[in-house]
Image: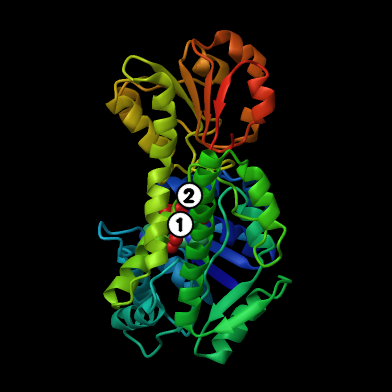
Amino acid sequence: MRISVIGQGYVGTTMGVVLANAGHNVTGLDIDKKKIDALSKGELYFYEPGLEEMLQQQIKNRRISFTTNARKAVENSDTLFIAVGTPSHDNGNADLTYIKQAARMIGSFMNKEKLIVVKSTVPIGTTEKVKQWIASENQGDSTGKVVMNPEFLREGSALQDALYPDRIVIGSHCEEAAETLRKIYQSWSCPMLTTTPKAAEMIKYASNAFLATKISFINEMAKLCDTLGVDIHDVSKGIGLDERIGPHFLEAGLGYGGSCFPKDVKELLWTADANHNPLRILKEVESINHAQPRYLLDKLKNSLTTLKGKRVAVLGLAFKPHTDDTRESVAFPIIRQLLDEEAGVAVHDPVVHLSKDWLDKCVKQYGDPYRTVAGTDAVVICTNWPQYAELDWAKIREIVRQPLIFDGRNMLKAEQIQSLNFHYEGIGYP
Ligand code: NAD
């Protein structure tokens, strides 16, 4: 099948590569020439384990190519996947500018009947609008068949998630269109669920809302554990063994970030309010999550009395390990607060480089974690990169000014760290 993928971000690039790997002939389209130039050379412009190798393999096999030429991408394909961004407006409602542009562009170049697959996460009812936007630009009779096919991959394990998803959801009113998409996915072996487009849109938002709820739930429990002197690890393990609950997303810490959970929770809250059906649980989930960085900073301030003039090391800038994505990463509100309270800040991340804006604000970034922590009054862990657990903490004990560790991801072994005479605090981890 000849497939074009519109939008070569985290989702579009990953989907294009795995569709090529499944034997399809893929064209990746983006408006950003720099991204297209890099991908054409087999260079992944973002960090995602394993993806670059498969990209290069598929370029070599001539199964994938990249272009900024929209006409070519539309005309030379039978199926078009839309994987452009859907960021938030200030009020939380999803901004559909890019989806609308992509749909109109498809409409203006559509030369025959095609299948249009909406991969982007879009508010309930948008798939129907995509059809109308395509039709509004199309001179001929063909509007194409539009189906909703939400994506559930996670950055950091995107390739594995896209190759081996838990399920594929196909939202379509047209059985023929759904069947074409099932054929495209015929080499995938997971359950496939066919629903209406609106249900497929809702499944994506409800999935992310539920996972965000699990995270805020365990963070609430962790704070109570702090007060009662109970280890949240025991609690997470104990409740996670219940099949009805499951072990995932029960790690207490600084809360969720990234390009999806925060914006998708906001959008669902906006839609619920607009439909006079407010989601009270989800409002609390969002406010609990928002308060998590403050909770760790209060612990830090209790220990240091004042942040003014203190030097603090922040380990981890990515919103989670194995990605270079910093969208809605909790590290940044933490750094901002430290600077506001006149602390000096040194940061480290294995793959993220601070922008000039942050460096101009006198944040120092080092390529070496030991240099980052040297001479500091406290170490704050924001991202659970596995390499931080492997650091020589005995050596770090020798080079810090004060032996204080605030582990926002509960990733270090408290007993081991305390045995090195550190004052160690996690979240719900006495
Ligand atoms: P992204 O911001 O990384 O990439 C979007 C790309 O679309 C950009 O490269 C941009 O230049 C391109 N683009 C915008 N308008 C275009 C147009 N008219 N024609 C061609 N290209 C255009 O976004 P992402 O993280 O890949 O997310 C894409 C969608 O998938 C969003 O709706 C997101 O919510 C959803 N999603 C993301 C993830 C994730 O982990 N990132 C997971 C599941 C679903």
Quadrant of residue 305 within the rendered picture: top left
- Height in image: 216 above or below 190? above
Q: Secondary structure at mark 1?
A: helix
Quadrant location of the C terminus? top right
- The image's colour scheme reads rainbow
Q: Secondary structure at mark 2?
A: loop
Q: Position of residue 164 (x, y in %)?
A: 69, 63
Q: Residue at x 72, y 58 (%)?
A: 241
- Which residue occupies the extreme front position in the image? 228
- Height in image: 407 above or below 273? above
Looking at the picture, which amino acid does disc 1 mark? Phe
Q: Residue at x 47, y 50 (%)?
A: 36
Circles 2, 1 touching at the beta carbon (< 8 Å) = yes
Q: Position of residue 299 (x, y in %)?
A: 44, 30
Q: Position of residue 175 (x, y in %)?
A: 57, 91
Of residue 341 and residue 38, the one placed in the foreground of this image is 341
The residue wearing badge 1 is 261
The residue wearing badge 2 is 256
Quadrant of residue 89 within the rendered picture: bottom left
Quadrant of residue 394 within the rendered picture: top right
- Evaluate whether residue 412 shows in this view: yes
- Evaluate whether residue 56 shows in this view: no
Quadrant location of the N terminus? bottom right
Q: CA distance from mark 2 to mark 1?
A: 7 Å
Q: Is residue 423 left or right of residue 306?
A: right
Q: Earlier in the sequence, mark 2 or mark 1?
A: 2
Of residue 332 and residue 55, the one placed in the foreground of this image is 332
